[in-house]
Amino acid sequence: MSDFECSINDLLEFIELTKKYSGNDLISKKEIVKNKIAHFAKHKKIDSMHTLCGKFQHDKIFRQELLNLITINETYFMRELNQLNSAMQYANTLSISGNTVKILCAPCSSGEEVYSLGILAKTIGIDKYLLKITGIDINSDMIQKCKEGIYNERSVKNIRQSQKEIYFKKVNSDYKIKQELMPMIEFKTINIFNDSLFTLGQFDIILSRNMMIYFDENYRLLTIERFAKILKPHGRIYFGSADLVPYCDLYSKIIDLSGTYYEKV
């Protein structure tokens, strides 16, 4: 690592590049980032941050590896349950018409939120063929974990024992979700700042919780504007309790007993 050349200006250039591609503002974690990158560069036989930045911009596979390295993933089943219940009660109301309800989880991290929605949907009796949940994340390693659906004890800490027995298969000390009990689910590696977001179609509900805490004001506003383009009229979007949501006239802020959500005008 001592052979890796990285001036403060080179480090700041890399942080700006990652912000451009992912929205994440890593300036407060620059020393942590520097150490992670130095280990990564040594493994790749790259001797300077300048060379690494160039490769980051022009090599998509290399860029994905680095984004996987620096993105933060921290979640568990039934997190902020009141919001999940609110979303599923709304989905239940929409499904009565017989039309498929589409939900987007962005980011989906390692899949706990998506599968939590699936469990809640079955619990309240939503026809699994009338519900489609799409999970997207910038981190391709996380998407692979989503598809595997295997979780440790900490991830399922909020799942009741009876639910564990119904919805999971024990695999040694871990828990594997029973995919056959879930509604229609798909996971994709997608960056919300890439126009591939707009290929996903239109959604009735979007959950984007605790992602914008890593963004500055400009990227928070850009985020909610881009989501508005794929949210149906009067569709709902749920943000995390720690997210700072900028004002935008595309939405009405609704506060009820379940908490807060935003409805597309």
Image (cartoon, rainbow, N blue to C red):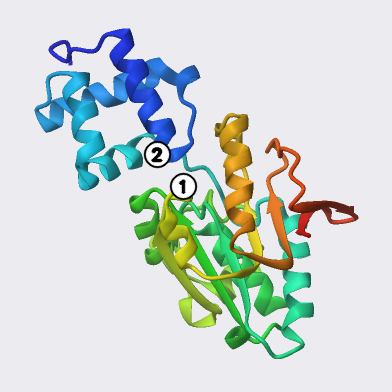
Q: Is residue 139 above or below residue 105?
A: above
Quarter occupied by the C terminus: bottom right
Q: Secondary structure at mark 1?
A: loop
Q: Position of residue 199 (x, y in %)?
A: 45, 67
| Residue at the spot of label 1 | 193
Q: At 58% from the left edge and 58% from the top edge, which residue is drawn?
A: 113
Foreground residue among 26 and 20: 20
Amino acid tagged 2: Tyr
Q: At 57% from the left edge and 52% from the top edge, which residue is drawn?
A: 226
Q: Secondary structure at mark 2?
A: helix
Amino acid tagged 1: Phe
Picture quadrant where residue 50 is located: top left
Foreground residue among 193 and 122: 193
Viewed as shown, does residue 123 lie left or right of 71? right
Q: Earlier in the sequence, mark 1 or mark 2?
A: 2
**Visible in this render: residue 49?**
yes
Q: At 46% from the left edge and 47% from the top edge, which residue is drawn?
A: 193
10 Å crowding of disc 1: few (<14), some (14-19), many (20+): some
| Residue at the spot of label 2 | 21
Q: At 37% from the left edge and 17% from the top edge, which residue is drawn?
A: 12
Q: Position of residue 108 (x, y in %)?
A: 51, 55
Count of marks placed on residues = 2
Quarter occupied by the N terminus: top left
Outermost bottom residue: 98
Q: CA distance from mark 1 to mark 2?
A: 7 Å
**Visible in this render: residue 174?**
no
Foreground residue among 104 and 16: 16
